[in-house]
Amino acid sequence: MIVRFWLLDVNSEVENGKSEVWLWGIEDSGKRVLIIHRDFLSYFYAVAEEEADPSFIVQKISKGDFPSVTGFEVVNRKLFGKPVKAIKVYCNDPNIIPKYAKAFRDFEGVKDCLEDDIRYVMRYLIDNNVTPCCWHEIEVEEEANVLGIEVDTVYLAKKPPTAVKRIDVPQLRILGFSMACYGREGSPKPERNPAILISVATNQGDEKHFVVGENKDDRLVLQAFADDVRRFNPDILVGYGVNERDWPYLVERCRKVGIKLNVDRAKTEPHTSVYGHVSITGRVDVNLADFVDEFPEVKLKTLESFADYLGVMKTSERTLISDVDVADYWDDAGKREALKKFSSENVQCIMRIAEAILDFAIQLSNLTGLPLDHVGTAAAGSRVEWFMMKQARDACELVPRRVEQPYRPYAGAIVLKPEAGIHSDVAVLDFKSMYPTIMIKYNLSPDTYVSAKEPVPAEGVYEAPEVKHRFRKEPAGFYKDALLYLIAVRDDIRSEMSKVAAGSREYMVLDARQKAVKVITNASYGYAGWIGARWYAKPVAEAATAWGRHIITNTIEIARKAGLKVIYGDTDSIFVKNEPQKIGEITAEIAEKLGLEIKLDKVYMSVFFTEAKKRYAGLLPNGRLEIVGLEVIRGDWATIARNVQEKVLEIVLKENSPEKAAKFVQLFIRKLRQKQFPFRDLVIWKTLTKPAEEYAVKASHVEAAKMLRKAGWELTVGDKVGYIVVAGSGRLYERVKPYVFASYDEVDLEYYVNKQVVPAAVRVLESFGITEEQLLGSKTAEKETRSLTEFF
DNA sequence: GCGTTCAATGTACCT
DNA sequence: ACAGGTACATTGAACGCG
């Protein structure tokens, strides 16, 4: 019997001493199924030394005591482009593979063992061309559901599945949840603090709240939550920070109160697995917080600010309750409803973010081949790597082991010093996807590199400028093939998108897919230069930037020779005076001489530069202000400073009136001194980049973090600390408090005037001759205005 | 002993 | 835990002065 299914999740189990792959799927009919594949043999490679005879090696190995080996196969493969003979060693116990590989490395004639570090499930997926979040067909027979798996049917696979060309996603059941814990000793601990409130929502519109009674006994809450999950039987569970917080807490708490947390489809408990994701057998656990990094505009990566950014729930319309205050809200009869409302809003945010994110997550999973519950937690480098592994297999390239590499920096891109001040009518030209384009054009790939000691091959080489790294022209390296594939796929998707209604379900899926393709394409250069990469290839990255510098330098020269004033440039772009005819001419000349396409990206009606690189603001014809690098878009400046600078830029660029801007700043400062701005606009957020003890110098956010920790609130590396500068004496770091512990009365307003608002404003206004003193002015308002008026 | 100078430290940004 | 290039605030030790 043939079954057609969409692959939701995959895991492996050991049954009667034999490994089997479990494929969790959804059929067209909506049936949830489990397909068990029993006879997939895993393997690793023993790579033979150049002079060695592989069959001799096989003979020798056969005499050793390796009971799990079931067979050998001598094959031709490549390693970093060099042909090698390899012995594929099949084993019936996947778990013993690393041990055998280690032993085999010592055999005479064996250069190395490879791919022993690829887990059984991933081996299965790659070798059979099975991709998660995609439709497949498979020959199966029905099997008795002896284990009581919570699916409609259990099948036994007769053959590996084959992919079906279909892009649609079945109707998935999604359940989101959010929890609150009661504690007054700092960060809640499952050993001592109950889960007082769990809010649950589904994509079928249900919303439920499980709340403890007055005795705060959470057994019923936990049980009801687990029962409700099983009743709804979701395919996907979503939350925010669930892998590191909610799931471990729930598991521990249930253990403590003597309940089994049964929320999966196979009667096991949630367990932490690779990349730190929590695995819930038969379902997919998605931590939405893993996807906030795709939006660098979101500075503070909390649920509420992510939701605010996506436009699903405005923070300004909410009463936010920080962890520090949960117990107070619970204990105060008048405030408890607010806590419930907060929890309900949180789970609503989660559901709406899921709606906005899941299409992308699904497409990224499908493109990289990483299961949906891994793909979020996997770092950018891993995502590229898994994508490349599939490409490598097609090219018969062996997957190298990850080897510890020393960090060796190399030269990157060129940035021009801008001409400070305001320029009007400025065109921005740029090379789209410059590094991927260069990598394709010059066949930059780990398997095409010709080292300095090697002779030039017959087909010739491309030699990078400056660094002189050489890459064979033929055949195409697997990076080139991979990048060409990605670009072709993206073009296909875009043409498909133009055929369907914008905003339709199909359009959204296609758009999510082209975004996933873009993410992988753009990360490929960085991957090549990453020392953690299996295919770390410094010459590839170094040659890409060298060609990039060559191209942009020549572009600047061509523009100048054509009489175009070059105002600024960074990596792959140039800012020139907008003269369409000349731009047309140089575009053609660049294409002809450099073989790369430069395009008009946008025209600024006016653009403002400081003396510094990477910081400017431009006014677009539609009236939108684009701000780059300046304090406005920096998350480590207080909101008041960002707001004042944004307004100054707007006045300067739209009204061309620095004087008006200066007066605005003076008024702003008066309001600040009168405490007219919300307290939260004074909070400064900075990331803890290492454990507090490891800092070489005292720093404000670290001191604030220590104060939080003293009160029991644990922070880990990567967390952002929000602090307030309070009145007092001494160093800055001696005058800060976590914002949750501070009140408006303690604030050192003069710090915010002198070190936040004024510097942010002066950054822009000093170009127009306005000084800090003028903005601060003298004591009375009249005098301020007069001195400024006199100045002009 | 005290104020100034400046390299080092730390964070976040740009492409 | 994708790269290098860059700006800027703050710290803290060295430096200069007398």
Image (spheres, coloured by chain):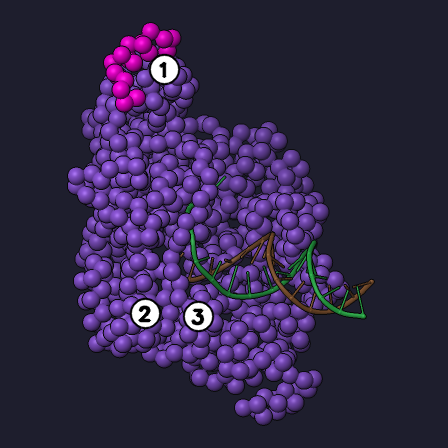
Chain colours: A purple, B brown, C green
In the image, what residue occupies the spot 32% across and 32% down? Answer: A399
Q: Quadrant of residue A197?
A: top right
**Is the C-beta separation of discs 1 and 3 under 8 Å?**
no
Q: Is residue A527 visible?
A: no
Q: Earlier in the sequence, mark 1 or mark 2?
A: 1
Q: Residue at x 68, y 49 (%)?
A: A706
Secondary structure at numbered mark 3: strand
Q: Earlier in the sequence, mark 1 or mark 3?
A: 1
Quadrant including the N terminus of chain A: top left
Mark 1 vs mark 3: tell me if same chain. Answer: yes
How far apart, in angstroms, are the residues tagged by discs 1 and 3? 62 Å
Residue at 48% x, 37% y: name it: A276
**Location of residue A256 (image quadrant):** top right
- Depicted A534 relative to depicted A438: above or below: above
Q: Measured from the top left, where is residue A414 in percent x and y?
A: 38, 60
Q: Nearer the viewer, residue A123 or A142?
A: A123
Q: Where residue A578 sits in the image (x, y, percent)?
A: 29, 76
Q: Position of residue A74 (x, y in %)?
A: 24, 19
What residue is disc 2 on? Answer: A428
The residue indicated by pointer 1 is A107
Q: Is residue A524 magenta?
A: no
For the residue marked with disc 2, what is the amino acid?
Answer: Val
Give the residue type at disc 1. Answer: Phe
For disc 2, the neighbor class at 10 Å (few under 14, some 14 to 19, many from 20) is: many
Q: Circle 3 sits on which residue?
A: A616
Q: Can residue A766 be seen in this snapshot?
A: yes
Q: Position of residue A116 (x, y in %)?
A: 37, 25
Task: Please give the chain letter of the residue carrying mark 1.
Answer: A
Circle 3 chain: A
Q: Which residues are magenta?
A: A49-66
